[in-house]
Image: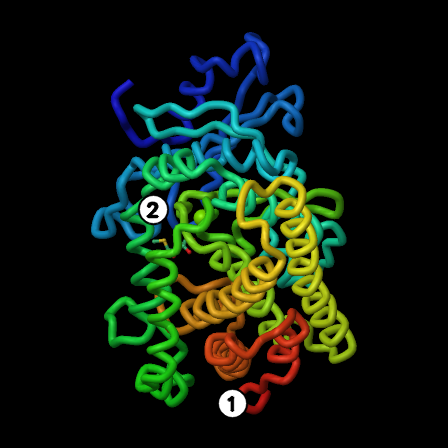
Amino acid sequence: MTYQPLNEDTALAYVKQSPLMGSVFAADDELHCVDLADGNVNLVFRVYAASDPVRKSVIVKQALPWVRVVGESFPMPLDRARIEARILEVEARWAPGLVPRPYLFDPEMYVQIMEDLNQHVIMRKGLVKQVKYPRFAADMGRFLARTLFYTSDLYMDSTEKKKMVAEMQNPALCKISEDLIFTDPYTNHPDNDWNRLLDPQAEAMRADDALKGEIFAMKEAFMTHAEALIHGDLHTGSVMLNQEETRVIDPEFGFVGPMGFDIGAVLGNLALSYASQHYHAPDEAARVDYQGWLLDAMAEVWATFEEEFRRLWETEGRDFGSPAYREQYMLRLLQDTAGFAGCKMMRRILGWAHVSDLQSIPDLEKRAYCESLALNIGRAFVMQRKALRNIEDLLAIVREAKSSFTYA
Ligand code: SR1
Ligand code: MG
């Protein structure tokens, strides 16, 4: 089939002629389609059977040759859909039950069909409402440990690892991350968008060469440290969950890169939520309680990751069997995690592509209070990362950070 962007009608017709008729759906099922596109980049449809819309339902995700929310002026290669489908398969192998089940990838239409998580919600939306997810931290720690360990040189055969590095090259999406996370926010790039009440802080950060030097160190690590197959965009909009289950979605920015980029994305986005709770949870007791939950979740993600990763290394590691090296490696991972977390927090405030935790705060003064707190946490993560010795040191940065504004 020649590539063409789908709409609700053609997505429905597409599913009706697919191998899913006879597996997920019966031939005589009455099917419906609804457009679900919500993120920045792709087309997303839900196709479901009228007789059982919860269980008989799939997600049809199609790449566009440009960024959906911008249009043709921001081109993006269709091939990212192949990489995403491949990474989803790898993640499903090493972390089964923690990603949606992949059903089909069509390399001509750049369409993936996968399990519909219609009993799960996007985590960021739940965090804004102070929902606690009891399974999240342990599940996420395990997802990180397993996907990162099994695709690293600690486990993989050296030749296979190098083949994977070549197969998972994702240069266009990596370039977007290089620009949007590590470069543009610290320049006068015309796409940057920030709350103008933050001008003094934003200008100071853009003029701070010590900060830029450390951010460039993180950028170079992002570009050159081919440690493991990473998800590449593991913010809280890439997690769907409920009280019992956690699923990681959308690995289209994945490539073989630094492990701390994924772990840092998770911790940095929890810290963004922490900063935003000054607005979302105005009752002080409720805010302190929820911020406590977020800090506990950050600690548990790291603790579960570290415990599982060490266990896998000790029991299944093929090489690098030195306890001294292991200690050095785990400490470097923690410090990288802090550095990438900080970069990922600051870009969401100073650059393009903001997050709803902060963007949904309508009062610009209240928003500036929260944004400034997040910027100060992010900056401290980057600048103090080499002094961190354990996860408590990282949490202390969050607890002790102050906004440069007064909450009015
Ligand atoms: C052009 S894509 C903009 C941002 O959305 C994605 O989720 C990534 O974070 C990317 O940087
Ligand atoms: Mg995404």
Q: Is residue 363 visible?
A: no
| Dot 2 amino acid type | Arg
Question: Nearer the observer, disc 2 or disc 1?
Answer: 1
Q: Mark 2 near ligand 1 (CB under 8 Å)? A: no
Q: Earlier in the sequence, mark 2 or mark 1?
A: 2
Q: Residue visible at 52% across and 67% down?
A: 360
In this rendered view, identify the residue nearer to me: 64 or 308.
308
Left/right placement of residue 244 relative to residue 149 reads right
Residue 41: percent from the left, percent from the top? Answer: 37, 47
Q: Circle 2 is placed at which residue position?
A: 68
Image quarter in which the N terminus is found: top left
> Is 110 drawn above or below residue 341 in the view shown?
above
Q: On the rendered structure, is 40 left or right of 133?
A: left
Residue 26 occupies quadrant: top right
Of 33 and 239, nearer the camera is 239
How crowded pointer 2 is (Cα within 10 Å; few <14, some 14-19, many 20+) is rated as some
Residue shown at 38%/59% (left/top)? Answer: 222
Gap between marks 2 and 1 measured at Cα: 35 Å
Looking at the image, which residue is at 27% across and 41% down?
77
The mark total stands at 2
What residue sits 57% from the left and 8% below the top? 28
Rate crowding at label 1 as few (under 14), some (14 to 19) or many (20 or more) other CA atoms within 10 Å: some
Residue at the spot of label 1: 404
Pinpoint residue 184: horizontal percent, then vertical percent: 29, 69
Q: Secondary structure at mark 1?
A: loop
Nearest to the observer: residue 180 or residue 69: 180
Q: Position of residue 397 (x, y in %)?
A: 60, 79
On screen, 3 above or below 28? below
Identify the secondary structure beneath mark 2.
loop
Work out whether residue 171 can be spotted: yes
